[in-house]
Amino acid sequence: MGDGPKAGAKWSKYSIADDGTLTRKAEFCPQCGPGVFLGVHKDRKSCGRCGHTETNE
């Protein structure tokens, strides 16, 4: 059905450090706070919840 796991899957936004702690790889929305990630696009980062958008320079 697909060529592999979805790049936007929630488990792909985290990694496990050597000491067993969970680290977040994605950036949080500054308005919504922790738990809501910004979607990464070619020219911008955007929040799907509140609509906050940051352009890449």
Image (cartoon, rainbow, N blue to C red):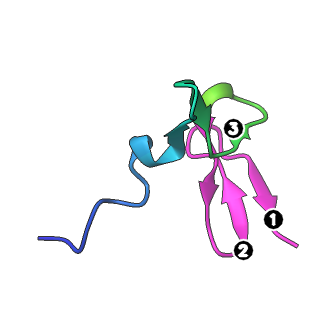
Residue 18 percent across, percent down from the top left: 56, 34
Residue 53 percent across, percent down from the top left: 75, 54
Question: First in sequence: mark 1 or mark 3?
Answer: 3
Q: Which residue is mark 2?
A: 43
Q: Is residue 46 above or below residue 31?
A: below
- In the figure, residue 54 lies in which quadrant? bottom right
Residue 47 percent across, percent down from the top left: 63, 46
* Secondary element type, mark 1: strand
> In the image, what residue type sits under mark 1?
Thr
> In the image, what residue type sits under mark 2?
Asp
Q: Residue furthest front?
A: 18
Q: Which residue is mark 1?
A: 55
* Secondary element type, mark 3: strand
Q: Is residue 44 magenta?
A: yes
Q: Quadrant of the N terminus?
A: bottom left
Question: First in sequence: mark 3 or mark 2?
Answer: 3
Q: Residue furthest right?
A: 57
Question: First in sequence: mark 1 or mark 2?
Answer: 2
Q: Are marks 1 and 2 in contact (CB under 8 Å)?
A: yes
Q: Are marks 1 and 3 in contact (CB under 8 Å)?
A: no
Identify the residue at horizontal 70%, vertical 58% (top origin).
Answer: 45
Q: Which residues are magenta?
A: 36-57
Residue 20 percent across, percent down from the top left: 52, 25
> In the image, what residue type sits under mark 3?
Phe
Q: Residue furthest left?
A: 1
Graded by Cα atoms within 10 Å as few (under 14), some (14 to 19) or many (20 or more), the crowding at tag 1 reads few
Label 1 and label 3: CA atoms lie apart by: 15 Å
Q: Are marks 3 and 2 in contact (CB under 8 Å)?
A: no
Q: Which residue is mark 3?
A: 28
